[in-house]
Amino acid sequence: MKKRIMLYPGDTMTAEERMKAVIRLQVPDRVPAVPCVYYYFATYSGLTFADLFDPKLYRRATMKLFDELGPWDAYNFFHTYYRELASFFIPMVTMEPGFELPASSIRQFKEEEIMRPEDYACIVEIGERTPRLSFYRIMMGFMPRIYDYIQEGWRSYAFVLPRFAAQLAYYRYEFRDWIDRGATLFYSIGPVEVPFDTFSLARGLIPFVKDLSKYPDDIRRAADALVPGYLFLIKATVNLFGIKRAMIDLHRSSNDFLSPGQFREYALPSLKLLVAGLKDEGIDVIMHCDGDWGLNLEALRELPAGQCVIQLDGATDIFKAKEVIGDRMCIYGDVPASMLALGSAAEVDEYCHRLIEEVGRGGGFILGTGCELAPNARPENVKAMLDSVVKYGYYDK
Amino acid sequence: MDEKLVRAMGDLDEEGVLSSVEAMLSAGTEPLHIVELCREGFEIVGKRYETREYFLSGLIISDDIFENVLGLLDRSGCFQAVEEEKLGKVILGAPLGDVHDIGKGLVSQLLRYSGYEVIDLGVNVRPAGFVEAAAESGATVVGISTLITVAYESLRETVLGFQHEGLRESVKIMLGGGAVSQRVCEYAGADAWSRDAADAVKFTKAFIGKE
């Protein structure tokens, strides 16, 4: 029988039990904390951002942070040791530290047209012919457009697939560090950009907005056609790592970009299809919702209750989100990056206390950073955030 | 006809806008008058964006429609752009270390349509780049847009640069972009921060004092 590791002396649930409880909108023993960390691993360990491409340095840095400022409940990971694999999930031209950027810069994305208008029809065709492989086939088509050293056709598969396999092996190896320490994996796969947002990123914002007027039906059809490919990819990875959760990114569906009407008309249908398909497999969904989602929250009520987590980054009023959809989905967030970088530990403590009291009321809440933990966050602020779930987060105290 | 064009532009009705422009050109309307009416339509778009009736996608569409209007005017052969008097000069850029430019581009678009001259320095601009551009152009508003928290130091250095050169009193500095907040504004020593493009235009109008 597996040993039940408790992260803190006051805990009565394991991290995995706690995670399942909050997603089902039940009251756990305490509020879980799940910071979303990548570049901060480097700053805390005195590494450059480029060093994080080295599996040994990355792994050492993650455990140093967890052991010294943690623990926390789940490993929210989104690193790849091969830069090209990041484009597999966010199909954009990237500039990486140690490559196009100095080792001390963070990754940045460029708005370039990776995808062409005629690709919508191609995606529909591929989706009809090979539904389960549609995601791979589309992304493999994009890779040579992003990296000039990746060739088209079978050569792009020959380039990507071995790296993909190696990355999965690295993941499997380093996940043990977290499980041995009592944390759980936040998800088996993620973050995967949902179909609609994939088009927005790959086409570039301005061309894509124009596409919405010119080819609305093609976009809807192409988004739906990709869903079986996403389901196949997610199910395969969930089977490999065993945690029945997936993270999906919605970078371009917020009200910063779309009206609530456009969201309902174009983005929501394929999102609902994807979430329903995952529900059939018993897979929960963590939605990484960048930007202001205030006017889309009502529409998200159409997603199944007790299956989804919505991660907010500080741009959406998280307290209002609790009122509008707190009875349907678990809310995750949202200590702002600027507070963690420039504020005081007392301010962080006070804000986290408020989040736990108000958003955490009745369960269904995960304390986290608003989007990624700022690379220049103050260690005492990160500590204050993580400590707050022990200070204020127990439900029976 | 004038009202129809303004309304169509405000409603983002491309077909309506282009048919009105064609009809007006056939009737001999002065192209500059047509441009002016489009600008009035843009004001409606801007207001609707401010009140969240329109979203960023609306701004992008309005820009596209206007480009098509300019194309029609060009093809008509009777349009010659005349240098108009601008309401003021605004410098825009993304700070050192940041290469994102979409948000900045939209602020630039709204400011231009509101009658301001925009000097866009692009992305990854050194602190001294902002200071030098302001000194050379005489611009009185500087807008810096960033999406990344590691650019905070660069924002602060830029504001300090204006102080060192004795230009701080004559220039107002506004910040924008997803990584910016009141706290960042205070940290950098800027004058204002904006959540969206409409806010940036409001601040510019308030400072320059002309509409």
Image (cartoon, helix red, strand yellow):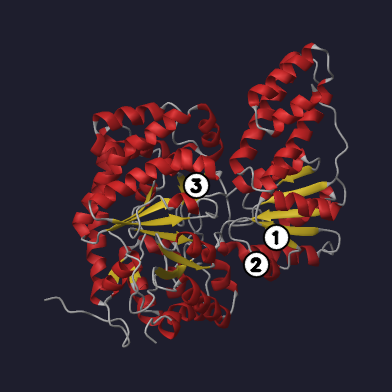
A154 to B75, vertically: above or below:
below
Tell me the subunit letter for badge 3.
A
Considering every residue shown, the one lying at the far left of the view is A1
Do residues under tags 1 and 2 come within 8 Å of each other at their CB atoms? Answer: yes
Mark 3 Cα within 10 Å, few/some/many (few <14, many 20+)?
A: many
Q: CA distance from mark 1 to mark 2?
A: 9 Å
Of A173 and A372, the residue lying toward us: A372
Q: Quadrant of residue B81?
A: top right
Q: Secondary structure at mark 2?
A: helix
Q: Quadrant of the N terminus of chain B?
A: top right
Mark 2 Cα within 10 Å, few/some/many (few <14, many 20+)?
A: many
Mark toward the viewer: 3 or 2: 3
Tell me the subunit letter for badge 1.
B
Of A170 and B5, the residue lying toward us: B5
Q: Amino acid at mark 3?
A: Arg
Q: Residue at x 36, y 75 (%)?
A: A72
B117 to A97, vertically: above or below:
above
Q: Amino acid at mark 2?
A: Val
Tell me the subunit letter for badge 2.
B
Q: Secondary structure at mark 1?
A: strand
Disc assigned to residue B193: 1
Residue linked to disc 2: B184
Q: CA distance from mark 1 to mark 3?
A: 23 Å
Q: Are marks 1 and 3 on the same chain?
A: no
Residue linked to disc 3: A252
Q: CA distance from mark 3 to mark 2?
A: 24 Å
Residue A188 visible in the shown view? yes
Q: Is residue B169 left or right of residue A135?
A: right
Q: Amino acid at mark 1?
A: Trp
Q: Residue at x 32, y 65 (%)?
A: A24
Residue A91 x %, y %: 41, 43
